Amino acid sequence: MTNAPHGGKLVQIKQTYKDSPSLAGFKENQKLAVSRETATVVANIANGIFSPLEGFMGENDYLNVLEHMRLESDLPWTIPILLLGPHNHHFSSGDEILLVDGAKHPVALMEYEGNFEISRQEYASKVFGTEDKAHPGVAKIFEGNECAIAGKLKAAVKPDHGDYADYTLTPKETRILFSEKGWNNVVAFQTRNAPHINHEYLQKSALALVDGLFINPVLGKKKAGDFKDEVILSTYKAILANYYPRSSVVMSVLHYEMQYAGPKEAIVHAIMRKNFGCTHIIIGRDHAGVGNYYGPYAAQEIFKEFPDLGITPLFFKEFYYCKRCAGIASEKTCPHGEEDRLSFSGTKLRKMFSEGQVPPKEFMRPEVAQAILKFEHPFVE
Amino acid sequence: MTKYTSVSIPLTLHKRLEKLIAKKTGFKSVSDYVTYVLREVVAMHELKEVPEPFTSTDLEEIKKRLQALGYL
């Protein structure tokens, strides 16, 4: 038996195809163009990753999330799921509207429930804890619309994940996978990075406590300097093939746009993995953070607010290779100072790879480094 | 927005909780403490009543896909 979905029911919106007759015949004023990232949100709502949400939030849920970090129903939720669009539409409550992508292809059928204005400043300060536009999440909010369009999805076009289709599993699929493997306790690992040795130790330390490890890298729009999607997948394939037991570890990718909201995003990451059927989630140092906006362990502290989250966080201090310990250690287990740690900044790593060099094996598995070197431009620009 | 209601608890229990909260529990009020505890209890009970979200047909189809992809 896998963990119960958030809110008790895995949302399953009817799946359809682009050329389905039910999506034909809509006039231009019954259509709403959405971005690729919004189309990804639609797919995540449709297959239950965002359960119990059945569509884009209305004003009550929105305000409750901002003020109390909970949906109107009292369930924990920390980042609004909004469809921000133009004001110049003429939909009425109850209308069926067709969400379309940039190429005007159908994405989903939605029942319009209304719209409301958001304050970008309020959103930024309450979700990200800052209004600094240098924060990528804040910048995105200030670039977008202020009109939030609420509605429930009635049908969604099955997404085409292209090269990643074989590595993409829905919550229904992971639940059956975990069940077939006989795993009662499954720990999730969220990542947007190629694996370093410290990640491997984090994952394996957590795995020692449970039946299975679910590695769930995030693919989608990211900030400059992050690894590209294809590099993340390729490096994980390399490390899994060489250093992980097949019987207790699986990987599938999550299509999701990082918000870099630190602690608040950690809660949403946990909810998504709960919906995949995981019972635990690894929360390490600076989870979902960016720059110095959040304390290094703020994402661990926030879990204290949610006794009813329904997924257990496993907290770890940062792992690293300590030269004096001559092995992998953590802030909890090692008495030595930062000067004894083998560490590389993101800038230094990017420089090394661009010059065809590889970091030492105490920092990154050679197979992972070689997988990165196969890409001429491994980083998002 | 969240609305609130009152729940009656014995005054003696209220006093004990006030003393507990004063000992740096991190709670601002008895109401906060009671809400926290009740959320934990309610969630525990709700979890016990959830059936698996797939049918036997789903199960067979998905197992085939997972086998084809090498997951099983």
Image (cartoon, coloured by chain):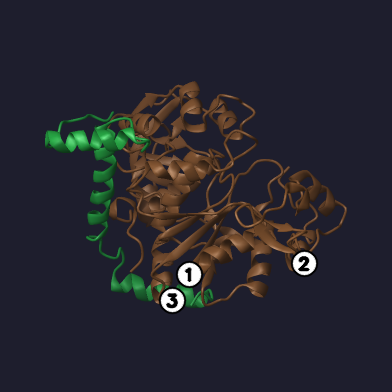
In the picture, the disc for residue A188 is: none
Query: Is residue A206 depicted above or below A183 in this figure?
Result: above
Name the residue: 68% across, 47% down: A226
| Cα distance between the residues tagged 2 and 3 | 30 Å
Task: Give SS at disc 2.
Answer: helix
Q: Which chain is green?
A: B
Q: Is residue B10 left or right of residue A111?
A: left
Is circle 1 on the same chain as circle 3?
yes
Q: Determine the chain carrying the residue at label 3.
A: A
**Which amino acid, mark 1?**
Gly
Query: Can I make out residue A41 in this image?
Result: no
Q: Earlier in the sequence, mark 1 or mark 2?
A: 1
The residue pinned by badge 2 equals: A366
Mark 2 or mark 3: name the one nearer the start of the chain: 3
Q: Which mark is residue A181?
A: 3
In percent of width and height, residue A5 lies at 34, 56
Q: CA distance from mark 1 to mark 2?
A: 25 Å
Provide residue A74's location: percent of width, then percent of height: 28, 40
Q: To which residue does mark 1 refer?
A: A212
Task: Kindly indicate which chain is depicted in brown in the rendered structure.
Answer: A
Question: Where's the N terminus of chain A, which quadrant?
Answer: bottom left
Query: Looking at the picture, which amino acid does disc 3 mark?
Result: Lys
Tell me where residue B21 sits by quadrant: top left
